[in-house]
Image: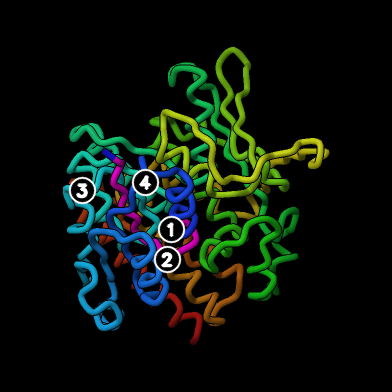
Amino acid sequence: MPQGIAILGSTGSIGRNALRVIEALGPEYRVVALSAHRNVELLAQQTRRYKPKLVAVTNRDSAAEFRAMMDGEVPMLSGPDCLTGLVQCDQVDTVLTAVVGAAGLPSVMAAAETGKRLAVANKEPLVIAGELLTRAVREHGSTLLPIDSEHSAVFQALQSGRSSEVQRILLTGSGGPFRGATVEDLQEVTLKQALSHPTWNMGPKITIDSATLMNKALEIIEARWLFDVPVEKIEVLIHPESIVHSLVEFVDGSVIAQLGEPDMCLPIQYALTYPRRVAGVSKRLRLEEIGALHFERPDPQTFRALPLAYEVARAGGTAAAAFNAANETAVEEFLAGRIKFLQIMELVEHCLNRHDIRQITCLDELLEADAWARKEVKKRLLIFDC
């Protein structure tokens, strides 16, 4: 039987690449379910091409538009909570989730609790709910596989040894558009400058996270849960070529790295075919064309997200939910032109200082912390305006 795959967020960059990968893999892999939030025109095109058994649209207005467009061609679910029903479909074996923000958390938990193979592209499930999600994976026999290029690289490198033999995990990052900058250099950063990523073509929110190095901060927290290691063993290296996607140093001094072109198709494919490796659509790496690879340490004084991430990871509980939500809200404000670049991290740090961190027993407690942080950012902005 072919592996039945549900793609949550099929109209985004990860979703589109996943469909390319699945098509190239052939009849052993089948698209069973697709979801989108608003881009129903593209979703309709994907539905007609891949013929899933079920489709979900989380925005109600867009769902009505999609329903009229398709005229009953495919069963569909709609509304903010519909993804949970999608992942519980009996024909779904693997759930590939690329839904940005906390909105996809209930469906990711549902996939883990029904024993599905879970391929995670977005950071939020493990950043916000890492403790709950990894527990659910263990208890229900699910399989959790990373698609994020850095964590896929670590996952692949870890095949070379036991977890008890790991000395350090080294997460690499391009450094974004402001590599080498000082705080003074960033005082008057424009939106256009912040969105000019030197390597990757990503959505605006993720691109801003790369500019602040918040993407690396979130990856630190994600790696802590995904690989079950103390946060002190996780470090960040700036690597502008984006060829070495991450490294693992073992206690004997060996350093194992995974290299590849900056192309998300490879980590997507590895998550779908693991533990096998098969031919695919990824561009082949030619090191002789690269010439040289460079590495440097990030400046924690300029990029405050990094030291904050270690504090959040050590605190546990609801801290990461507040950290992530404050950043999401602050980035929205920057993209809208209402705050300056450096105020993003000022708002995040303000929320962490104000947040009453609590230990967690359920997803609702995390969602409450998420909602609190979003309101706190808005409240702080009123003071800025005064």
Quickly name the residue at label 2. 11
Label annotation for residue 310:
none
Q: Residue at x 18, y 52 (%)?
A: 89
Q: Give the crowd class for mark 3: few <14, some 14-19, many >=20 residues within 10 Å.
A: some
Q: Quadrant of the N terminus?
A: top left
Of mark 1 and mark 4, the one earlier in the sequence is 1
- For the residues marked 2 and 1, what is the alpha-carbon distance in whole angstroms? 6 Å
* Location of mark 3 (residue): 91
The crowd level at tag 2 (other Cα within 10 Å; few <14, some 14-19, many 20+) is many
* Marks 1/3: CA–CA distance: 19 Å
Q: Which residue is mark 1?
A: 15
Residue 13 x %, y % = 50, 61
Answer yes or no: is residue 335 visible. yes
Does the magenta run of residues contain 150? no
Q: Visible in this render: residue 310?
A: no
As shown in the figure, which amino acid type bears the numbered disc 4? Answer: Leu
Q: Amino acid at mark 2?
A: Thr
Mark closest to the chain's N terminus, 4 or 2: 2
Magenta stretch? Answer: 2-15
At x 65%, y 52%, the residue is: 301
Is there CB contact under 8 Å for labels 2 and 1?
Answer: yes
**According to the image, label 4 marks what residue?**
126
Q: Where 384 falls versus 284 (above or below)?
A: below
Q: Is residue 333 above or below residue 219?
A: below
369 left or right of 338 in image: left
